[in-house]
Amino acid sequence: MSLAPIPFNKPYLSGQELAYIQQALRNGKLSGNGWFTQQCQQFLEQRYGIRKALLTTSGTAALEMAALLLDIQPGDEVIVPTFTFTSTANAFVLRGAHIVFADSLPEHPNVDVAQLEPLITSRTRAIVVVHYAGVACDMAAVMALAARHNLFVIEDAAQAIDGYYQQRPLGSIGHLAAFSFHETKNVIAGEGGLLSINDARFQERAEIIWEKGTNRAAYFRGETARYQWVDVGSSYLASELNAAYLWAQLEKLGTIQAQRQRQWEQYYQALAPLAAANFFALPVVPAYALHNWHIFYLLCHTLEERTALIQHLSARNILAVFHYQTLHNSPFYMARHDGRTLPNAGYYADHLVRLPLFFELTFTDQQRVVKAIQEFYASAASNS
Ligand SMILES: *Cc1c(COP(=O)(O)O)cnc(C)c1O
């Protein structure tokens, strides 16, 4: 008898999505910046203290807008963690930047801020930080370092909606920040993202870049007599259909987060005895971070052990997955990298495994996952 599959992720449905999409159809406005777009933007601005929020087609698009706003030129250097998704670096590579990759902390996949200062040169323009698993980076240290060297800070908050650094919402601290509403994130739009603009200097131009290089948004507000091409830009607006879907989710943000917290803590408590017996390590959340329960992961002792654990779970119809392979030695960037080894990030690339975590995951499902992990380590212990 094989048990029903437990997927790694399943997109959350609040139940209002179709009704809101129908509403968008009735409104007769399907392109971007309509009622639902503005509803989502205002909600996020108010809830998270974001100066100006612009809904985009993806988190990737929001990062690309950030690179355009900073006017990154060929030869500029941008410091980016190596343990991240390709878009974090690729957005700046598209503008001709040279990426200087940074290592993770020993105790957490997030960037080790104490190791950043020696990476800064006269060509450095910006530091990008990634709040992995919705756990804050040490933002006070990042912002102080950037201020000392006159650099911009971009938060890749793709995973970090509703996460906090001390009392401050993630995505509201850097000069610019990018969120993602990809179906794998806590709150989704299918594909979607958001650029948050926290530095007033970028506000006007951000809207122009968002609207294909035109002053269309200002024109529709009656602020300019003509609607014309005034700068570079691209098609970064999300459609109203995606915004309508997203609004159905944002309305349930509290419910989503409460459920993920319950599930995350359930895994943590159930697995704590095995971690205490040193079979693997559990996630560490720094005291300055209030995380958003985006990812639950274990850290295995070796790559071989991780591969075997993933296989063991897969044989029981449970999908657990590893995560990023480091970007500095990726096929695309390896030859451009300066040769520094980044061992902490390498550790997370080889040892981290993510367990299923999604809204509909039941207590019984979680017990099945935990039991399968216990079985794996019981047999590992009796074999050694
Ligand atoms: C998901 C993700 C992205 C990309 O977001 P998309 O909306 O899929 O383009 C970028 N950076 C990180 C850290 C992510 O997790």
Image (spheres, helix red, strand yellow):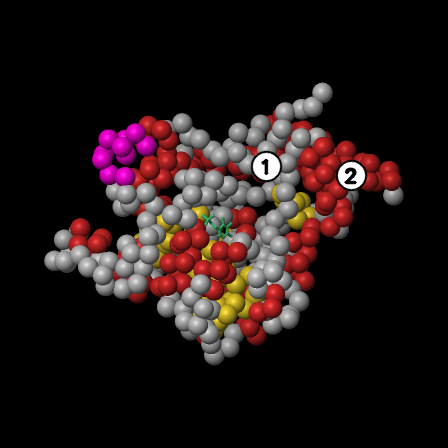
Name the outermost residue toward the bottom: 122
Across and down, in percent, residue 123 comes to 47, 76
Query: Does 28 lie within the magenta span?
Result: yes
Determine the CA span between mark 1 and mark 2.
21 Å
Rendered position, 20 above or below 224: above
Q: Which mark is residue 8?
A: 1
What residue would you read off at disc 2? 377
Q: Which mark is residue 216?
A: none
Secondary structure of the residue carrying tag 1 is: loop
Query: Does 150 lie within the magenta span?
Result: no
Three-letter amino acid code at disc 1?
Phe
Q: Residue at x 24, y 58 (%)?
A: 214
Across and down, in percent, residue 375 comes to 77, 33
Name the outermost residue toward the top: 1
Rendered position, 164 above or below 92: above
Question: Which secondary structure is most common in the magenta stretch?
Answer: helix
Q: Which residues are magenta?
A: 21-30
Q: Quadrant of residue 311?
A: top right
Q: Residue at x 70, y 30 (%)?
A: 316
Side (left or right) of 116 relative to 274: left
Q: Badge 2 local density, few (<14 within 10 Å), some, or many (20+)?
A: some
Across and down, in percent, residue 370 comes to 69, 33
Three-letter amino acid code at disc 2?
Tyr
- The image quadrant where one finds the N terminus is top right
